[in-house]
Image (cartoon, grey):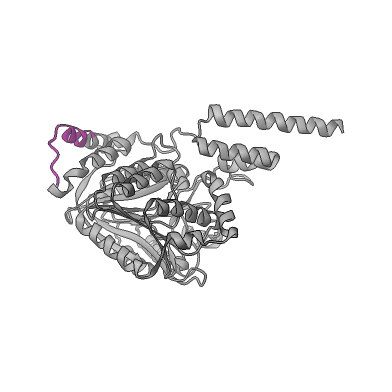
Amino acid sequence: MEIVSLLLGFVIIFNIALGISIVFLERKDPTSSWAWLMVLLFIPVAGFLLYLIFGKPISKGRIFTWDKKSRMGIKTMVQAQLRSLENREFVINQELEPYKDLIYLHLRNDDAIYTENNDVEIFTDGVKKFDALIQDMQKATDHIHMQYYIMRSDELGQRLAEVLIKKANEGVDVRVLYDDMGSRSLKRKYIKRMKNAGVMVEAFFPSRFIVNFKINYRNHRKLTIIDGKVGYIGGFNVGDEYLGKNIKFGYWRDTHLRVLGDAVQSMQTRFILDWNQASHEDIHYEDRYYNTSPMGDVGMQIVSSGPDSEWEQIKNGYIKMILAAKKYIYIQTPYFIPDESIRDALRIAVLSGVVVKIMIPNKPDHPFVYWATLSSAGDLLNAGAEIFIYQNGFLHSKSIVIDGKISSVGTANIDVRSFRLNFEVNAFVYDSGIAERLVQSFEEDIMLSTQMTKKLYKQRSIGIRFKESLSRLISPVL
């Protein structure tokens, strides 16, 4: 009995010490702190292990080597654009004049250079996106840089591998970066085959021990850059389900951009920073990686965020966009678990007469996240937002459109994980043509959706209400 009492006392003291660390030393968001304190209270020993794996904050030290940005001239360009905006010398299309402060925010917050000579193609279908990507890869003469959160060694994965191996055999530098957690089902045989053919393959935050203590911090970015000229950014990962071949999910509705122009340089820099961290290689920022030419008139900023950042750059951009809306806000996201700042911004917009339309999936790929999404959608529904449930398969698109003028497409969901835990990248697009095309796609999706009404939401069963309440309680740690 004495041993049991001693062990119990040790667990209590240890829990208290860890609780003090969470509250006073790590300075987490209060909701996240309360969630972890409850975990420690109800499951003391297992809760500690869960905290080590999922809750311990990542070091905000030098994960990525940013010092070379000075050599590349990025800092100089950022400062020049900031001064131009401050001195009211910044020239922009007249209809985009109200959004100069958003450009300024991303310059200050993320060193996100604004470019306006881009051509952008939108993909909402996985088959078309990957057909276009493979065609571009087949034309590569110098390098292919590919980064995905999820890569599978299924039919689509093998199809991509064939092209990557062929290009490597032709002397093209091929680099592939995948997230270790997201691509945990990727077969070693698949990786070995590519490496043996000369393809450079690396995992982001790979497991070093039996337990990966960085498993909660995932590189959710999806980028491909070809010859420094063509860039892809958006929501599609590599797997047969993204082509609509998974029976459970059916058709996969996502949004991805193909970009030509100087914005590709920012995408390239993001890849190189991630690659150098994962591979411990030191890719030099050579001219051949920045071989862009003016191709259009679309304005863009490529914005990154992650747990290593002091600011939540993409979330701040979303809030700024929402508060700038005068007519409407269209949002598509598979996971809608906004924190109070996003929820308040959307609620203020609705109460100010702005039409807010939010589209979410009709089925879960992660159950707790799905029930928390329904709960959050119900809150905005009660405030006056219009909520649509996509019925034609699975909705994975991460996009927001404001007044048919500006938009954002990328990898960030509207949830705590994307804002604080994952490494994300989004394209903020300043162009009415692109915004209108995204609006058109949204309205076409409405025809394939059902609208959630207050009456229907109130009729949900006790079981669903319980799942929503439980999921909402733990949403800060999802």
Point out the image quarter for the N terminus: top right
Seen from the viewer's position, the closer of residues 145 and 365 is 365
**Residue stretch rendered in magenta on the structure:** 79-92
Residue 30 coordinates in the image, percent (x, y): 51, 35
Residue drawn 35% across and 61% down? 255
Q: Is residue 269 visible?
A: no
Residue 119 coordinates in the image, percent (x, y): 21, 57
Residue 163 coordinates in the image, percent (x, y): 39, 66
Seen from the viewer's position, the closer of residues 425 and 139 is 425
Is 81 contained in the magenta span?
Answer: yes
Residue drawn 51% across and 61% down? 365
User: Which image quarter: residue 438?
Assistant: bottom left
Seen from the viewer's position, the closer of residues 224 and 302 is 302
Q: Is residue 430 visible?
A: yes
Residue drawn 49% across and 53% down? 375
Residue 285 coordinates in the image, percent (x, y): 31, 43
